[in-house]
């Protein structure tokens, strides 16, 4: 009996050790189905872009998640991440691809090639749009079941963010001040409805709470060699395409052109200027614009990404500490007070809350 007991204990211990070793960094099914994915660009040409998973329910965080699950690097310059149904679409700019993963365990299921991909959205079951930042630019139509490009929609120069509102998809043309239009696509037919002039350098846009679209125009940058122009915040009717508001934000000549925009709860909008995170409230005829989170931006420590949790109003501020060292995720309460800070990957540029 004693010999049998010892043998049984050895077997149980061996099995526990085996499961522990095999289970290291191996996710349980459904572990990542909900949470926040932080995209970390990495260092240009170094193939060290990464994903960070943050669980706001228990404040747990896992860095370099794709590598841990798939045993290979994600790629060079991770631009953005979109959760769509059961899949996640990681746009890896300089690797010229979109890496598609299962959200439940972050395992790779395939790759979609693209020459200069930036941002992806799901527009209907089985179909997505991907901006291809060319000059002139294009939106690639993606079959999300076959993971293949099926069509190309010509748009303006260097398209960046895109947003679906009702039957339309709005595309911001003009990254780095190269265009001044927003293209409107009829999602059902993949056809251009209208190209709308909004101002220099539209690069980001978010949905308003009243069938509207907020558009951030960064203006023409001083380093472009052209005369610098003002940055503007635009409010557009998402049905009639009428411009409801257009106002200057920031300070021309301060060397900073805002590109980060996020939609908050209660119809609020947030953007980043040289002095920090601003909160904008629509009054019905104009804006109130307040500095909510002061921030001394500099090259070595700058806000590089911005997102707001629609469930509780918490603000995710991504800090890049240069492009060779780890950055930080700062989570702020809706009143602008700091909740928690975490170390993440190199050059964190965005947060996908799903």
Image (tube, grey):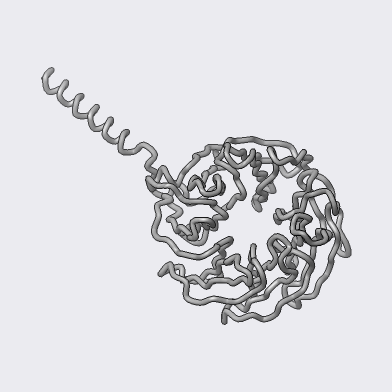
Q: Residue at x 63, y 35 (%)?
A: 341
Viewer-proximal residue among 299 and 141: 299
For the question of whether residue 50 can be seen, the reply is no
Taking the image as shown, residue 205 lies to the left or right of residue 82, namely right
> Which image quarter: residue 118?
bottom right
Counting from the top left corner in percent of width and height, residue 338 is at 70, 36
Counting from the top left corner in percent of width and height, residue 244 is at 83, 70
Viewer-proximal residue among 127 and 321: 321
- Examine the rendered structure and indicate whether residue 305 appears above or below residue 98: above
For the question of whether residue 49 can be seen, the reply is yes
Counting from the top left corner in percent of width and height, residue 12 is at 22, 29
Taking the image as shown, residue 328 lies to the left or right of residue 259, namely left
- Examine the rendered structure and indicate whether residue 49 appears above or below residue 129: above
Residue farthest to the front?
225
Counting from the top left corner in percent of width and height, residue 297 is at 75, 41
Taking the image as shown, residue 248 lies to the left or right of residue 106, namely right
- Examine the rendered structure and indicate whether residue 227 appears above or below residue 64: below
Q: Residue at x 67, y 81 (%)?
A: 193
Viewer-proximal residue among 273 and 35: 273
Residue farthest to the top?
2
């Amino acid at each position: 009996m004693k010999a049998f007991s010892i043998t049984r204990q050895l077997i149980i211990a061996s099995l526990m050790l085996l499961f522990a070793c095999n289970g290291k960094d191996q996710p349980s099914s459904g572990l990542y189905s909900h949470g926040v994915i932080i995209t970390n660009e990495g260092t240009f040409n170094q193939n060290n872009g990464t994903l960070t998973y943050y669980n706001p329910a228990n404040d747990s965080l896992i860095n370099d998640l794709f590598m841990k699950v798939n045993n290979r690097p994600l790629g060079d310059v991770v631009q953005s991440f979109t959760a769509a149904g059961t899949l996640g679409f990681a746009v890896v700019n300089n690797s010229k691809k979109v890496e598609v993963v299962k959200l439940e365990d972050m395992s790779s299921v395939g790759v979609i090639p693209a020459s200069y991909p930036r941002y992806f959205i799901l527009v209907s079951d089985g179909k997505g749009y991907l901006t291809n930042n060319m000059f002139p630019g294009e939106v690639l139509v993606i079959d999300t079941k076959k993971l293949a490009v099926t069509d190309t929609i010509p748009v303006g120069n260097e398209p960046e963010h895109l947003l679906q509102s009702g039957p339309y998809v709005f595309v911001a043309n003009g990254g780095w001040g190269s265009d001044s239009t927003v293209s409107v696509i009829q999602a059902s037919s993949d056809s251009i409805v209208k190209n709308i002039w909004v101002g220099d350098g539209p690069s980001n846009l978010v949905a308003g709470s009243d069938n509207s679209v907020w558009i951030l125009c960064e203006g023409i940058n001083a380093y472009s060699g052209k005369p610098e122009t003002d940055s503007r915040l635009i409010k557009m009717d998402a049905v009639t395409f009428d411009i409801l508001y257009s106002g200057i934000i920031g300070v021309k000549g301060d060397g900073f052109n805002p590109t980060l925009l996020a939609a908050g709860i209660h119809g609020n909008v947030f953007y980043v200027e040289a002095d920090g995170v601003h909160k904008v409230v629509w009054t019905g005829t104009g804006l109130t614009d307040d500095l909510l989170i002061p921030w001394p931006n500099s090259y070595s420590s700058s806000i590089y990404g911005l997102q707001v949790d629609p469930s509780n109003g918490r603000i995710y501020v991504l800090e890049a500490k240069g492009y060779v060292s780890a950055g930080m995720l700062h989570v702020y309460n809706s009143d602008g007070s700091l909740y928690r800070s975490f170390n993440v990957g190199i050059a964190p540029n965005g947060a996908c809350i799903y």
